[in-house]
Image (spheres, rainbow, N blue to C red):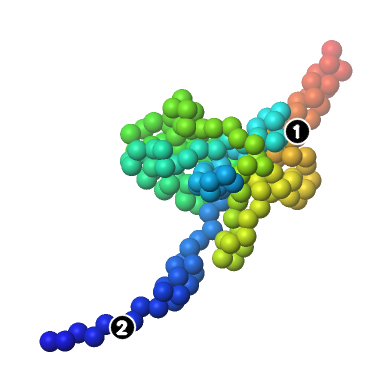
Amino acid sequence: MIQTMMPVDPSGLDADLKATKRFLKHIGSLKEDNAKVAIIFRTVPDEPGNCLVMGPKFLDDTYHNAFMKTLESAEAQNSFELGTYLARSMFPDGVNMLAYLHEGNFIKKMPTKNITVSFGSNYNETIGLDELNKLIAKEKGITVEELAVDPDAKKAQTKDTTKTKTTDAKKKSTK
């Protein structure tokens, strides 16, 4: 029996792969060697020109797979900063992800200008993380320095502080 094989169209296969590829937040690459990194925090408090990143490839297979599954989860993708979600996430053995990455020295502080982030319909366009941070800050109506604190948490904290001051003022006036 003779089987005939259909010729494979490499460009068609490439197009299919690109069509099924989905955009993931919190992923970037180093400008110097294009190594993939997970962006744990886009900025560092009091150091808006720095970020915290880690290379998932340095984790053992079990932790790598669990980390990537967490990174790809809807909760992680919806989080403002990946690190805040990792602080609530566990590896399969019950170890806290963010604590493990920190204690194991997997997280590295790097200048935001050394990290690129891909975007666009085919993910073929890139922007420096420093420029992306400026765009995000402008959109939120805050400074890049304020990105180190979750802007939504900061707004809630400001509201709580206002309420506390009002209550304290009332207590003082009744004495």
The reply, left or right, for residue 155 in relation to residue 166 is left
The part of the image, by quadrant, that contains residue 162 is top right
- Locate the N terminus and report the quarter of the image it occupies: bottom left
The reply, left or right, for residue 134 in relation to residue 97 is right
- The residue type indicated by label 2 comes to Met
The reply, left or right, for residue 174 in relation to residue 66 is right
Q: Nearer the viewer, residue 173 or 79?
A: 79
Give residue 17's mark: none
The reply, left or right, for residue 95 in relation to residue 159 is left
Q: Nearer the viewer, residue 38 or 82?
A: 38
Residue 48 visible from this viewpoint = yes
- Locate the C terminus and report the quarter of the image it occupies: top right
Residue named by callout 2: 6
Residue at left offset 16%, top offset 87%: 2
* SS category of the residue bearing label 1: helix
Residue at the left extreme, as displayed: 1
Q: Nearer the viewer, residue 38 or 158?
A: 38
Q: Residues within 10 Å of mark 2 (few under 14, many from 20)?
A: few
Q: Nearer the viewer, residue 156 or 120?
A: 120
Location of residue 70 with respect to 98 vertically, above or below: below
Residue at left offset 83%, top offset 21%: 169
Location of residue 50 with respect to 34 vertically, above or below: above
Residue at left offset 50%, top offset 52%: 74
Q: Position of residue 99 (x, y in %)?
A: 47, 28
Residue named by callout 1: 158
Q: Position of residue 29 (x, y in %)?
A: 55, 47
